[in-house]
Image: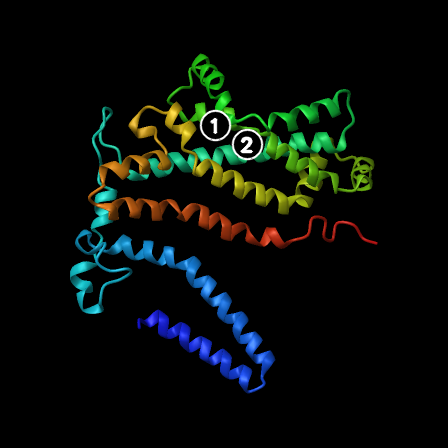
Amino acid sequence: MNILQILLLTLFVAFIALRLLGRRRAAARFARWTLLGLGAVVVLAPFAWLLAAVFKDRSVLNEYMFLPPIERWSETLNLNNFRQLFRGRPSLTGPVYFWEYVLNSTVYATCTTVLQIFFCSLGGYALAKYEFRGKTALTLFMLGSMMIPSVLLLAPLYKMVVDLGLVDSLPGLIIPGMVGTYGIFLFRQACLAVPNEMLDAARLDGCSEFGIYLRLVMPLVRPMAAAFCLICFLGNWNAFFAPNIFLHSQDKLTLPVVLNLYLGEFRHDQGVFLTGTALAMIPPAVLFFALQREFISGLTSGAVKG
């Protein structure tokens, strides 16, 4: 019987003992916390395994599930994976380093996310709060376009990028993704909840239309904007298909494309690939923890008194 089985058996015995002693509320509380703890272990175990694999030597990578015994740490734990990962690799334009791929992904994901939030929020605000001819038809057309697979648009999009002379460049990736129907629809739904009386009051106070959008509407839809920011950043950070098609030079590739190449290059040294994967998880994690407070804040909390 291994340690895990002993632990589970101990928890089960403790639960039965509480039930036999008539402490049902304590037993229910114990069972609830036990299930939450086991769920947390199941979720966090892959991350713990990845973190251990980053520092393990290639000779013991598959020998131990997590870390080797303490007495072997001096000979089995090192930073060789980081040294291999950040070593320059030859290309037609000279040596390319891993941090360049990180910079490419950061610029691509950040610029695309900022532009999408700006243009999608403008479009959603216009559809929600302005009346103009063809508004219903335009909304239906936009919703219908969401049913078209993006792969079908790749050929004409690539032709447009070629005509603009933006192939093999980050602007060639960023410009086509500046706005999306999904984002416009999300912001439209959020802006519908903003009271029209607030907008009319701002106009009476002399605020410009863009000022109303920037100073009044955007703070009120901040929770949804934060959620869309995270979704958009993750989508662009993990994008593989478009960067793999539009980018050709080695020094302009993004992290997902490079990590896919590392699967073949380091097939006998998986620790280097796992180290790159672990580093690629850090920016999305930082963004999530920075925006998590916005997810629980109210849409118009404190905006209207009464």
Q: In which quadrant of the rendered image does the N terminus lie?
A: bottom left
Dividing the picture into quarters, in which one does residue 172 lie?
A: top left
Dividing the picture into quarters, in which one does residue 214 lie?
A: top right
Camera-side residue: 20 or 282?
Answer: 20
Taking the image as shown, residue 70 lies to the left or right of residue 301, namely left
Residue 135 screen position, x and y as percent: 74, 24
Q: At 72% across and 36% down in the image, what residue appears?
A: 212
Q: Residues within 10 Å of mark 1 (few under 14, many from 20)?
A: many
Camera-side residue: 48 or 212?
Answer: 48
Q: At 78% across and 50% down in the image, what residue appears?
A: 304
Residue 51 screen position, x and y as percent: 32, 55
Tag 1 residue: 174
- Marks 1 & 2, CB-CB < 8 Å contact: yes
Residue 62 screen position, x and y as percent: 23, 54
Q: At 55% across and 87% down in the image, what residue appears?
A: 21
Q: In which quadrant of the rendered image does the C terminus lie?
A: bottom right
Res 115 label = 2
Taking the image as shown, residue 168 lies to the left or right of residue 141, namely left
In the rendered view, would you say 108 is above or below 176?
below
What's under tag 1, amino acid-wise? Ile
Residue 176 screen position, x and y as percent: 51, 24
